[in-house]
Image (spheres, rainbow, N blue to C red):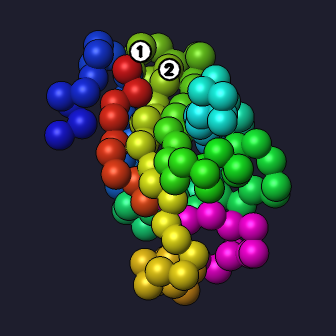
Amino acid sequence: MLERFAATGKYTTLAGDALKASMAKVEGTSVVATVNEDGTPNAAIFVPMMADDTHLVMTLAANRTRENIERTGQCVVVYDAANPQAESKAGRHKGVRMRCELVAAESDEYKRVAEAWPRMTPYTLVLRVVGFMAIG
């Protein structure tokens, strides 16, 4: 399914256990993209983790990115584990783009993820990944 989104097919798209393991080791950089109230783009680097196959968890203090996610209920997360020394182009960039929706803190879905994630804090957001897209 991810292949249909690939623009070039020349990079490695991470998914499932490989994505969870890479993010857990913080092998790559995650850019979270949101939209400000005035419609301008906002992008920031954070360290989200995959709680399971379809949920990201991310701990954010009060900041513009958090405000935007809470206001719009959505964001896009780009995860890229770069390896400039790799011999092949496919090895130089491994990652994924994820369209995410905020999970309401009072929902059963949030509670399920929170019970399974050992590092929950009052500042942790739970995001449902509604779309996985190839990195390139």
Report helix, strand or loop for mark 2: helix
Q: Tell me which residue sits at (76%, 42%) in the image.
A: 64
Mark 2 surroundings: few (<14), some (14-19) or many (≥20) residues within 10 A: some
**Considering only vertical position in the picture, is 29 above or below 115?**
above
Tell me if label 1 and label 2 are in contact, CB under 8 Å.
yes
Q: 75 and 91: which one is in front?
A: 75
Asked if the magenta segment contains residue 109, the reply would be no
Task: Report which quarter residue 2 is drawn in.
Answer: top left
Task: Report which quarter residue 121 is drawn in.
Answer: bottom right
How far across and how far down the image is residue 79, in percent? Answer: 53, 37
Q: Which amino acid type corresponds to the residue marked 2 in the rendered image?
A: Arg
Task: Report which quarter residue 99 is drawn in.
Answer: top left
Q: Which amino acid type corresponds to the residue marked 1 in the rendered image?
A: Ser
Which portion, as a residue range, is magenta?
A: 116-127
The answer to whether residue 30 is left or right of residue 65 is left
**Considering only vertical position in the picture, is 10 above or below 107?**
above
Task: Residue 45: give its label.
Answer: none
Residue named by callout 2? 92
Q: Tell me which residue sits at (29%, 16%) in the image.
A: 7
Q: Tell me which residue sits at (75%, 67%) in the image.
A: 123
How far across and how far down the image is residue 27, in percent? Answer: 62, 42
Residue named by callout 1? 88
Say whether residue 131 is visible. Answer: yes
Q: CA distance from mark 1 to mark 2?
A: 7 Å
How far across and how far down the image is residue 75, in percent? Answer: 52, 43
Report helix, strand or loop for mark 1: loop
Q: 48 and 84: which one is in front?
A: 48
How far across and how far down the image is residue 41, in percent? Answer: 62, 25
